[in-house]
Amino acid sequence: MFFLKELPAKRMIEGYTARYPQADADTIERALVMMRDASLLVRRIDGFFAAGGFSQLRFLVLIVIDREPERDSLYMTEIAARLDVSRPVTTRTVQSLIKAGLVEATGHKDDKRQKLITITTAGHARLQQLLPDYYALISEFMSGRAPD
């Protein structure tokens, strides 16, 4: 998260960057705006999921499985590799999805430690329920942003 509500004035940025020849004030200013905007969007998305009794991470697990065009399931290790969270967090998240009936786990035929995770019918229905409002939230947010 980016925790600045009010960004520094252009003059202040220029004052700092004047001391460092590799720093460009315009680039720094654009980066700060981008970080603040991204943080605001993440907060709105988190609020959207929380209001529906879900989480962005649970949603992302469903999405990374669902987006594979040639497959309908992924191994836990593949899910963890596609997310920017630790393996224990991924494992707990997948376990919560299993408990909710949104995914199911089956063991690998040769190595029972490997779990293949598949979205259930209820999981697909939950995605279809969430996606329209999720996309609307992002579209609304982005429509208020000036293009670069």
Image (cartoon, grey):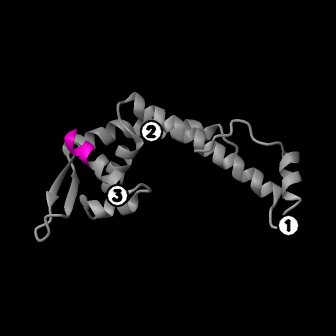
> Spatial distance from mark 2 to mark 1, Cα to Cα?
42 Å
Look at label 2 and name its amino acid.
Tyr
Q: Earlier in the sequence, mark 2 or mark 1?
A: 1
Say what secondary structure mark 3 lies in.
helix
Name the one closer to the observer, 120 or 83.
83
> Spatial distance from mark 3 to mark 1, Cα to Cα?
40 Å
- Give the residue number, with chain letter if any, for mark 1: 21
Residue extent of the magenta highlight: 95-100
Q: Which picture quadrant has residue 88?
A: bottom left
Instruction: Look at the numbered discs 3 and 2 and tell me whether their residues touch, using CB distance below 8 Å.
Output: no
Instruction: Look at the numbered discs 3 and 1 and tell me whether their residues touch, using CB distance below 8 Å.
Output: no
- Give the residue number, with chain letter if any, for mark 2: 134
**63 horizontally vs 26: left or right:** left
- Give me the residue at 58% from left, 37% from top: 141
Q: Could one spot residue 101 in this view of the protein? A: no
**For the residues carrying marks 2 and 1, which lies nearer the camera in this image?**
1
- Residue 57 in the image: state x and y as whole percent: 39, 46
Task: Give the main secondary structure, helix, strand or loop, of the magenta stretch.
Answer: helix
Look at label 3 and name its amino acid.
Arg
> Spatial distance from mark 3 to mark 2, Cα to Cα?
26 Å
Q: Residues within 10 Å of mark 1 (few under 14, many from 20)?
A: few
- Residue 17 in the image: state x and y as whole percent: 84, 57
